[in-house]
Image (cartoon, rainbow, N blue to C red):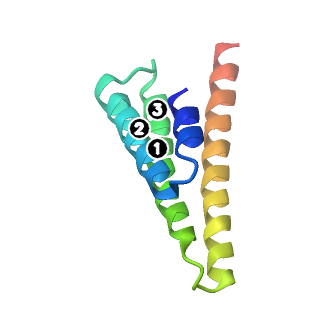
Amino acid sequence: MIFAGIIVFLHDETYFQILAISISNLILFSILVIKLPFKDLPENIINSIAEILLIISTGIISSYKEDNEPEEDRIFRGWFIVAIWALVFVVMLVYFIVNVVREI
């Protein structure tokens, strides 16, 4: 709900959006590290790494505002972000499948 509010109400303020989302991600990361809300430690670690990568990717995305750089650099950064999140997705999927198989 907070994420949607940030996106909708700060539509014209791109950098403020990124700052607000990064701050909320830092708060969530802090909660993950301090409270350890998940049962398994590996699950806490995976979610913490995902939050760190989300903060890094929002930092990379914030540099897209500059139009004076070569298009190849922008494309490379975009695919780099896609690769990071594909890797996170695969790791989370494998962990989920291992847990499901372990419970059977």
Disc 1 to disc 3, C-alpha distance: 25 Å
Mark 1 and mark 3 lie on one chain; the one further toward the N terminus is: 1
Mark 3 and mark 2 lie on one chain; the one further toward the N terminus is: 2
Taking the spot 32% from the left edge, 23% from the top edge, the residue there is 35
Q: Secondary structure at mark 3?
A: helix
| Foreground: disc 3 or disc 2 | 2
Q: Residues within 10 Å of mark 2 (few under 14, many from 20)?
A: some
Quadrant in which residue 44 is drawn: top left
- Residue where numbered disc 3 is placed: 42
- Residue where numbered disc 2 is placed: 24
Taking the spot 58% from the left edge, 48% from the top edge, the residue there is 11
Residue type highlighted by circle 2:
Ser
Residue type highlighted by circle 1:
Ile
Is label 1 in contact with label 2 (beta carbons under 8 Å)? yes
Looking at the rendered image, the quarter that the C terminus falls into is: top right
Q: Secondary structure at mark 1?
A: helix
Q: Nearer the viewer, residue 94 or 5?
A: 5
Question: In this view, which residue lies farthest toward the top?
Answer: 104
Disc 1 to disc 2, C-alpha distance: 5 Å
Residue type highlighted by circle 3:
Pro
- Residue where numbered disc 1 is placed: 21
